[in-house]
Image: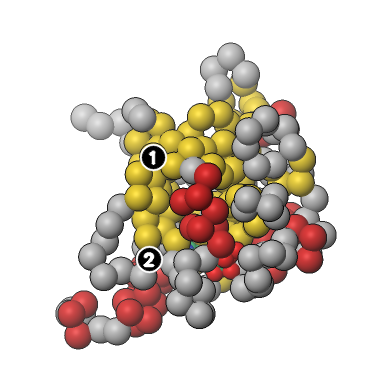
Amino acid sequence: MVVNYEDKKLTQRYQLMAQTIIPRPIGWILTQNDEGVLNVAPFSYFMGLSSEPATMVVSIGHKSDGTPKDTLKNIRNNKLCTICMVDESSMQKMHFSSKEIPSHESEAVMFEIETQQIMDGFPPIIKDTPSAFFCTLYQEIDLANSKTIPLIVEIQYQYIDEKIIKNKEKLVLEYDPLLRVGKSYATLGEKITPPQIP
Ligand SMILES: Cc1cc2nc3c(=O)[nH]c(=O)nc-3n(C[C@H](O)[C@H](O)[C@H](O)COP(=O)(O)O)c2cc1C
């Protein structure tokens, strides 16, 4: 079967892509508005983009009332975000934090998500995150007519929990991220060593 994307509605395209382009990493993004309200929300249209400049891309949509999601609003406003990686231990709180709530309320307060302020000038990290990226907005991509806005963010600093560092000098890290597969979650299976290219 070959599907013509021109004939498909947005929700059908999403469904097809989200079940095929898998697994997707989850970026648990913390931002702040001008009043200092801490916003926390997960995003899985999220991926590393380049190491020079060190960038990642995250695509953020709109709320059910048609206004930009708070994460998008906050990043557009102050150009800052902290993106935390997630492991299985945080699944429930991460999932709960996807609830659509008013901008003046904080998911961190509503769902008792513990955070830690460790980097001046950036939003805090989630307390038990294996790793977090402190980022600035690099570029907003204009996808014509799209309600989903890809943002390229540049990594300024990375926090790494000591427990995932296997070799500090060689910068070897190891952890088991929580991944998005369709509407479900998964963890990594067995790693496969690549064969030698002849
Ligand atoms: C695992 C997971 C991944 C998600 N990925 C995205 C995404 O890539 N883009 C998006 O716009 N919404 C995504 N959502 C939905 C947002 O988390 C949700 O709309 C949230 O309310 C946005 O919050 P905000 O308005 O505080 O920014 C995802 C939800 C979950 C549970």
Is 40 left, or right, of 48 in this rendering?
right
Label 2 sits on what residue type? Thr
Residue 152, percent from left and from top? 38, 45
Residue depicted at 30% across the width and 69% down the height: 146
Label 1 within 8 A of ligand 1 by Cβ: no
As drawn, the label of residue 148 is 2
Residue depicted at 80% across the width and 50% down the height: 114
Locate the C terminus by quadrant. top left
Q: Residues within 10 Å of mark 1 (few under 14, many from 20)?
A: some
Label 1 sits on what residue type? Tyr
> From where the camera sits, is residue 91 visible?
no
Residue depicted at 41% across the width and 69% down the height: 18
Q: Secondary structure at mark 2?
A: loop
Q: Residues within 10 Å of mark 2 (few under 14, many from 20)?
A: some
Residue depicted at 51% across the width and 74% down the height: 63
As drawn, the label of residue 183 is none
C-alpha distance separating marks 1 and 2:
17 Å
Locate the N terminus by quadrant. bottom left
Do labels 1 and 2 touch, CB within 8 Å? no
Which callout, 1 or 2, points at the residue further toward the start of the chain? 1
Residue 35, percent from left and from top? 68, 53
Label 2 within 8 A of ligand 1 by Cβ: yes
Q: Which quarter of the frame holds ligand 1? A: bottom right
Residue that badge 1 annotates? 138
